[in-house]
Amino acid sequence: MPKLSTNKFVKLFFFGNYFYGVCAVALSIEGALQQHYPLNDLLYYVLAFSSTIVYYTNAYILTEVSDDIANIRSMWYARNKRFMMGNQLFFLLVALFCGGIFLIKRWESILALNGMEWFLLLIFPLVSTFYYGVDSKVFGKINLRNVGWLKPFIIGFTWAGLANIYPILYSCIDNGQHYHPTLVGGFLFLKNFMFITILCIMFDIKDYAMDYNAQLKTVVVKLGLRRTIFYFIIPLCFIGLGSFLIYAMAQHFSTLKILINTIPFILIITVAYSMYSRRSIFYYLIIIDGLMLVKALCGITAMTFF
């Protein structure tokens, strides 16, 4: 993908984390449709989009500002620091504005949340905060990102919450109702958790040599490249595919609906076999992270038309 490294729009879209914002919106729509909830208002999706950009950009601004020619993204942030600071401020204000409007409109429903709902509302931002690290008198110094093998599971857990818990929780608050967990919702949460965790492990292959030298015990470093692919990633994909097929048959899905939803599993297995070759960062951002968007679009299509 040599041309992509010189395309300004592509760099902005992926390095600026707009792509992750799009994935957040798409996965939220998929999560609502699969749990048979109506789509939320525009306010929710703007909040999800802007909050995702703020979270990822904040991490990169803090950690990737050196003008390192060996790291395209690091160099891009170093050269566009002023623009990205302005971009960060803009989306932070958008997120705060949307959150403020929702708080003013639904403060009574928010105050009426029960203990379980407060737990679900707070657990995902709390875990994502600990991922990049906090140093406080209350919690001490915690940085889950430094626990290499735990990284992909933390990311998968947080994205699953965004995709499957928050759309429904927002809808319930917006309509003055209480959130009631379901078996279907639990299965879909685990499905997203597993799928995105696998993508994160595949993404760690990019940094295998660097993590190995830094003695950061990621899953790839602990197992090795071949074992990670053939004894971890691919078996998990088949387990996920098998559990989905059992679920689909129990729910009496049509053949086309089943086929559409199996596309992401087939693609992730195919991509896993390609991980032996060295790839550019855009391969990981577009192909591997792109599977999140493919999964969401397949789920939306299947629920809308079949």
Image (tube, grey):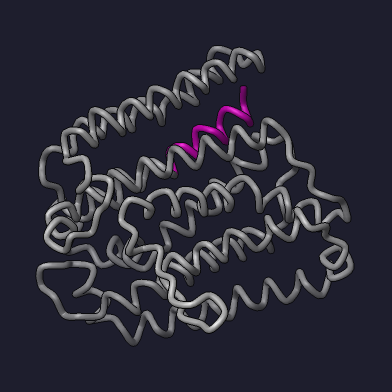
Type of secondary structure dominating the magenta stretch: helix
**Which residue lies at the image location 45% right of the left edge and 38% below the top edge?**
194
Tell me where residue 284 appears, x and y as whole percent: 26, 49
Q: What is the count of numbered marks?
A: 0
In the image, 194 versus 256, the foreground residue is 194
Tell me where residue 82 appears, x and y as whole percent: 34, 87
Q: Is residue 81 left or right of residue 67?
A: right
Tell me where residue 175 appears, x and y as whole percent: 86, 54
**Which residue lies at the image location 73% right of the left edge and 52% below the top edge?**
169
In the image, 286 versus 273, the foreground residue is 273
Q: Is residue 120 left or right of residue 218?
A: right
Kindly give the residue lying farthest to the bottom in the view shown: 82
**Which residue lies at the image location 61% right of the left edge and 60% below the top edge?**
123
**Within the image, what quadrant is residue 142 found in?**
bottom left
Tell me where residue 192 appears, x and y as whole percent: 51, 40
In the image, 240 versus 231, the foreground residue is 231
In the image, 269 versus 120, the foreground residue is 120
Q: Is residue 154 above or below residue 288?
A: below
**Which residue lies at the image location 59% right of the left edge and 35% below the top edge?**
188
Give the quadrant of the C terminus: top right
Q: Which stretch is magenta?
A: 293-306
The stretch drawn in magenta includes residue 38: no
**Within the image, what quadrant is residue 304 found in?**
top right
**Within the image, what quadrant is residue 247 found in?**
top right
